[in-house]
Amino acid sequence: MEYVIKKENSNECASSRQNSIRNKVRGILSIDVHLENPLGNKFGLDYFDVIISSLCLEVASESLEDYTRAMRNMCGLLKPGGHLVLVGLCGQSFYQVGDKTFSSLPLRLHQVEDTLEHLGNILLSMRWIKTQESKFSDTKGAFVIVAQRSKKP
Ligand SMILES: C[S@@+](CC[C@H](N)C(=O)[O-])C[C@H]1O[C@@H](n2cnc3c(N)ncnc32)[C@H](O)[C@@H]1O
C-alpha cells in the first residue's frame, strides 16, 4: 500500500487508504471463468461497467481455446461499451510460490490482442512491461491492456 501511495505522490497514510478501500468493497464472490456465467446466477451477464483481471486467465487455461472461452465468458459480464483492464503475462509456462509450482499458458502478445478483437472488443491501449529473469517463473514480460466491449450486440 505504501508503495502505491508513494507512486501516486500522495500524502495519504497507508491505514487511511486501507480503510477507504475496505469501505468501498461491496462483496467477495466466487468466480470460475470457464462457466458461461462466471459469477453464477447472482449477477446477470452484461452487468459491470469495468472489470479488472490480473494474472488469472493464463493460469486458468491449458490451451488457446480455453483462454478464448474464458475471455469470452469474462467479457460477457461487461455491459456493452464497458471497459476491461487486463493484466497478463506472456511466455510463462510455470511460476512458483513457496514450494508450490503452478502451470500457466505461455501466450504471445498478439494472441491476447487477436483474442480480444475476435470477441468484438476494441483495444484502447497496451503497455508492455519487461520482467526480470527469475528462477521462480519463466515469464517473458507483462502487459496491461485496456479494451472496450463493443456497444453493438
Ligand atoms: C497468479 S494468481 C493472480 C492473483 C491476483 N489476481 C494477482 O494479480 O496477483 C492466479 C489467480 O487465478 C485464479 N484462478 C484460477 N483458476 C480460475 C478460474 N477457473 N476462474 C477464475 N479465477 C481462477 C486463482 O484463484 C488465482 O487467484
Image (cartoon, rainbow, N blue to C red):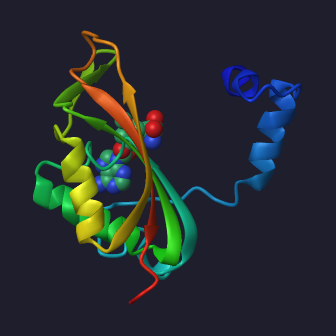
How many tags in the picture? 0
Up-down: is 42 above or below 133?
A: below
Q: Is residue 34 visible?
A: no
Q: Is residue 63 above or below residue 147?
A: above
Image quarter of residue 150: bottom left
Q: Is residue 26 left or right of residue 78?
A: right
What residue lies at 45% left-to-right and 80% top-to-bottom? 41
Residue at the image point whose x is 70% and y is 60% from the top: 26
Residue 145: image x %, image y %?
Answer: 42, 49
- Looking at this view, is 147 or 91 the one in front? 147
Quarter assignment of residue 71? bottom left
Instruction: Pick the quarter of the image with the N terminus.
Output: top right
At which x and y percent is residue 78?
Answer: 48, 73
Residue extending farthest to the bottom is 153
Query: Which is nearer the eye, 5 or 23?
Result: 5
Residue 5: x, y in percent? 75, 27
Q: Is residue 4 left or right of residue 139?
A: right
Where does ligand 1 appear, by image quarter?
top left
Q: Residue at x 79, y 25 (%)?
A: 9
Q: Nearer the viewer, residue 143 or 27?
A: 143
Is 66 situated left or right of 50 in this image?
A: left
Q: Is residue 120 above or below residue 116?
A: below
Residue drawn at x 74%, y 30% is: 8
Decide: is 76 above or below 147.
below
- Is residue 61 visible to the viewer in this orientation of the structure? yes
Q: Identify the image quadrant of the C terminus.
A: bottom left
